[in-house]
Image (cartoon, coloured by chain):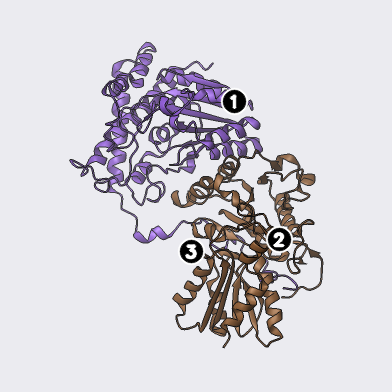
Chain colours: A purple, B brown
Amino acid sequence: MGTVTTTQLRSMYEDMVTARYYEERLQEEYMEGKTPGFDISAGPIPGELHLAAGHEAAAAGVCAHLTDEDTVTAPHRPHHIAIAKGVDLKRMTAEIFGRETGLSAGKGGHMHLFDPDVNFACSGIIAQGCPPAVGAALAAMKRNESSVAVAYLGEGAISQGAFLESLNLASLHDLPVIFVVEDNDWAISMPKGRISVPQDGSKRAAGFDMPGVRIDHDDATAVYEAAAEAVGRARDGNGPTLMSVQVHRRMGHFMGDPETYRPEADQQRHQERDSIERLAADLEAAGVDEDERETIREDAHARVDDAIEWAKDQPEPEPDAALEDVFSNPPSGVTDEDPTPEFAGNGGADR
Amino acid sequence: MSDDEGRQATMSTAMVEAIATEMRDNDEVFYMGEDVADYGGIFDSTDGLLEEFGHDRIMDVPISETAYIGAAVGAAQAGMRPIAELMFVDFFGVCMDQLYNQMAKNTYMSGANVNVPMVLTTAVGGTYSDAAQHSQTLYGTFAHLPGMKVVVPSTAYDAKGLMHNAIRDDDPVVYMFHKRLMGIGWMPAPDGPKTAVPEEPYTIPFGQADIKREGADVTVVTLGLHVHRALEAAAKLADDGIDVEVIDLRTLVPLDEATILESVQKTGRLVVVDEDYRSFGLTGEVISRVVEAEPDALEAVERLAIPDVPLPYARPLENRVIPDSDDIEDAIRKTQP
């Protein structure tokens, strides 16, 4: 078991308050021009927006064990994970605002964040980030590297074939991959009890002969300790782990979601369980007092505000840039200066 | 140009030779697929590779296309050069998300900060009564969706050069080999795909169609198996004084529009022959490219394709829907004054 140090607690707290404030600020920016009648096409942030307030512990507790060399794939709700993985906050924000200097120059948006500098990628399709994470782990194994891969998914994704197939392939080859189910109880409007058996995603592990661990309280320190074991197992070549972390959905599935399907008591309950407050208590016990925590929060908020202001000042992409980047090489695929021209063009002797 | 001398090889031998050479030169290249190791590929696509490279690099995988093709995407994004085989292209339905939403789009969605240097090999085509779920080519489906280069060799020579280029390319390449052309013992190939193949490596750049036969009276644009059926028709028509030019597209993405236009400007008559479905596909695309670029160049145009029905089983039924050399001959005659 990894015993968490004060430095690590402080670092997780920093990630979590950054992520929480980031989502709150994005919510404000996103809703600008979208009220009173919600119009998805209006306002400074285009498209859908899936915010992760209440999910922070699952991101911070696992990513605390990762380096830039480790790969993370995130689903359509990726910001808190990207922040914990160290994705460039300014360029990520510019991408969300659809700007030219965004991570993908405005071609991806908030569900498709890619930062190769820290090996972070997303897929907006449920559970489909799992197979590429398995592939990154396969590459690490083949290259004899100690890096690991982490695939994040929601509890609504645990019946997707891509997830189940990935568990099989990862376990078959003892690949260094950790699957992290962020269980917020809801797949948009469908409570997990209506769509999944068993409801605890970590139980899927048993069918694939791999360890499954459930962290049923939204607690960054508990996630940290479970992830220490899982990441350690992966780095040591002992194969994959499936983790399921209870988190809380403090906002709608997407911004503009009226949540009319959701009982008020459930909304209330999700507001009350706050992993950030829980971690603050751990910090207090470790001697990091409220003054110090306030400084961490202020710094985090300033960083977020800076990133958002910077992003909003960035230019939009030129329209014709839409026609670029389908491929990274020329269409001909020729990377050599001289593709042996004496043979090229000869369709075969007797043809 | 012509290389009549030298070693003759089947298409599968040529394809495997390119893979083996790239694997020897680059440790990052590996092959994943169902029955690719001990079996050597159901259609000989990996014949003999296990003996040299072992199970770590010639990997049998679970029947789990989403997982292993997605794993190829992830390994490619990590900088390796995986080759993943989809045993029949018809199976694309079980893994289309990994192909289309991940493999084909991640480059674009990342603003080309990420690239996906992988090859998807897949067996295509009918003519042996494998019916609707094992006989399609789906050329048009893959070429329609942006983000994949689409390669369709028709000869051993082309198969080798295109495979070298595919593995070296930094982008995803869908390499569609026609089962009937591979030279498999139990599925005899027609004359034609077995050609002289140089021992040394060479690349054929994508987007360069090959004029397999020069002619002045009519242009036939085709690919894969139908290159050979068109050449057979052309040989018969030559006796009647009709001089047929046969263009083998070799790659659909990118498409060599220039070679098609040049030929049509010369002949004024165009026949497009496809082994994919007729509507919304390759034949319509080629014809509209010509019409857009040279509205007055065409005096006559015909197209042959699968008439918008699934591939049937019984021999007379399958023969009815897949164009043969007689159908091509008839279509060519219709274009003649």
Could you tell me the amino acid type at mark 2? Arg
Q: Chain of mark 1?
A: A
Q: Which residue is mark 3?
A: B280
In the image, residue B307 above or below residue B259: above
**Label 3 CA crowd tier, 10 Å (few <14, some 14–19, many 20+):** few
Residue furthest top as drawn: A285
> Percent x, y for residue B102?
50, 46
Task: Indicate the quadrant where residue B12 lies.
Answer: bottom right
Q: Nearer the viewer, residue A322 or A279?
A: A322
In the image, residue B199 above or below residue A134: below
> Percent x, y for residue A249?
34, 27
Mark 2 falls on what kind of element? helix
- For residue B276, the mark is none
Mark 3 falls on what kind of element? loop
> Percent x, y for residue B189?
75, 63
Q: CA distance from mark 2 to mark 3?
A: 25 Å
Could you tell me the amino acid type at mark 1? Gly
Residue at 67%, 73% (x, y): give it: B325
> Percent x, y for residue A267?
29, 24
B321 sits to left or right of B290: right
**Label 1 CA crowd tier, 10 Å (few <14, some 14–19, many 20+):** few
Q: Which residue is mark 2?
A: B180
Q: Nearer the viewer, residue B100 or A307?
A: B100
Q: Which residue is mark 1?
A: A207
Of circles 3 and 1, the one toward us is 3
Task: Indicate the quadrant where residue B336 lies.
Answer: bottom right
